[in-house]
Amino acid sequence: MAEQTDLLILGGGTGGYVAAIRAAQKGLDVTIVEKSKLGGTCLHKGCIPTKALLRSAEVFDTIKDAQEFGIENVTDFSVDFKKVQERKQGIINQLHQGVEGLMKKNKIRVLEGEGAILGPSIFSPVSGAVAVTFNDKSKEEEIIVPKNVIIATGSSPKTLPNLPLDEEFILSSDGMLEIETLPKSIAIVGGGVIGVEWASLLNSLGVEVTIIEFLDRLLINESPAISNELKKSLEKRGIKVLLSSKVSKADIKGKEVVVDIEGQDSLTVDKVMVAIGRKPNVNGIGLQNTSVKFDDKGIQVNEFYQTTEDHIYAVGDCINTLQLAHVAMKEGEIAVSHLLEEDVDTINYTNVPRCVYTNPEIASVGYSKDDVPEGVKAKVGTFSFAGNGKALVYGGEGGFVEVIRDEETDDLLGVSIIGPHATDLISEASTSIYLDATPIELGEAIHPHPTLSEAIQEAALDTYKKAIHK
């Protein structure tokens, strides 16, 4: 006899488990099928572990700079990478236990195994029944017939045909998280978010780093001003940045990797990391048994995350939207609200905050001055952290804030930040855009002194040429 449930969610990552909690809060009977661990990529192989490593790198940088703060005789310190990794894993384990606790609290059934969506069958006249094959091979396959399905199967690291991953010498971000010792040198193929974050943390920990980027600048989705500032900062730290460069192949020779770059000298390193993005996990989950449309970019959905079969939804990295944990969470919530026939606002992806956890940090929301829609008369305000007291006290005076204002409507169009704690500061700008605040309201609101947030205030006022400290 097939099991019945109100909602079955394929995948227990951030999109999946948040959708499950919201549905359970609304009184639905919810089942999650997860083949690995609850929390998904973000918790186990992405956001959380990399930020834990970046924090260790930040602490090490602070110790190295101790004399600048008047702290003398700080000697004989080094990186114990085993302990760094242990701390990272401890954080993951604590958060994982927390997610498991949330499932129990909300009475969500979690099945450890793989799910495949079935077409119309004896179990259901429409597609959507799910066959679950358990990780525990002693358990028999189970058929579950849900009223609705949310697919939240996430994504996996991409690579190139000429860079086959072996996770020993040529590694993805997954493999990098498992290394036991730091290499002396590494080439990172890809200058996007994943690539520059790893470059930053490895450089801080003493690794010789080269970034090889096919395009003409780092972080192509940020403004050129931000990209250029980051490149200058990374190069000042000793990271080699090769732009407009294409890797033709990488050969493993003994314990080293020889990287051939078109039109340039080859590069010999201990490791190569491939950081060219992630691909949606859409194969092997039974979509071919349904009329759901999907391709290499992901599952096709409408603005409420319905597929072409209206009782089957998809959210997160397996659809063609921003591959960000907070986006997946919100998509999951919207999908649940929609299947419950509640009124719900859709996501304006331009106004989703985006963060890069390099040193210096980068964050942005809305438009930059280089991608403002045609016909919009934009006014740009800027303020340097060199003029901000808290930044100088903190020791992070590099970088700036950029605020974009629509000169005709006075709308706040966007904010970009590169500098200390940018990823925390961006929430003020994101909230301001969400509440439809104008730059003058952002600028005239009293900001405590001394704080880094004053740089946003000054940049907002600068769009009217009213900045006080500029």
Image (tube, rainbow, N blue to C red):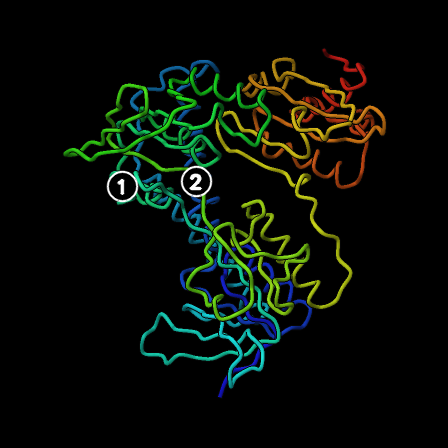
Which one is in front, 120 or 313?
Answer: 120
Q: Seen in the image, is 467 located left or right of residue 402?
A: right
Q: Residue at 63% of width from left, 32% of height from top?
A: 364
- Outermost residue to the top: 470
Residue 350 drawn above or below residue 410? below
Assign a secondary structure to mark 1: loop
Q: Amino acid at mark 2?
A: Thr
**Which residue corresponds to mark 1?**
180
Q: Nearer the viewer, residue 188 or 120?
A: 120
Disc number for residue 8 = none
Residue 171: percent from left, percent from top: 31, 41
- Name the residue rendered at 43%, 74% in the picture: 132
Secondary element at tag 2: helix
Residue 78 percent coordinates (x, y): 30, 27
Q: Is residue 51 above or below residue 390?
A: below
Could you tell me how far apart the alpha carbons at marks 2 and 1 are, in whole angstroms? Answer: 15 Å
The residue lying toward the viewer, choosing from 372 and 296, is 296
Q: Disc 1 residue type?
A: Glu
As drawn, the residue found furthest toward the left would be 254
In percent of width and height, residue 366 lies at: 68, 34
Judge by depth and name the residue closer to the eye, 176 or 424.
Answer: 176
Q: Residues within 10 Å of mark 2 (few under 14, many from 20)?
A: many
Q: Is residue 219 above or below residue 292?
A: above
- As displayed, is residue 427 above or below residue 108? above
- Quadrant the C terminus occupies: top right
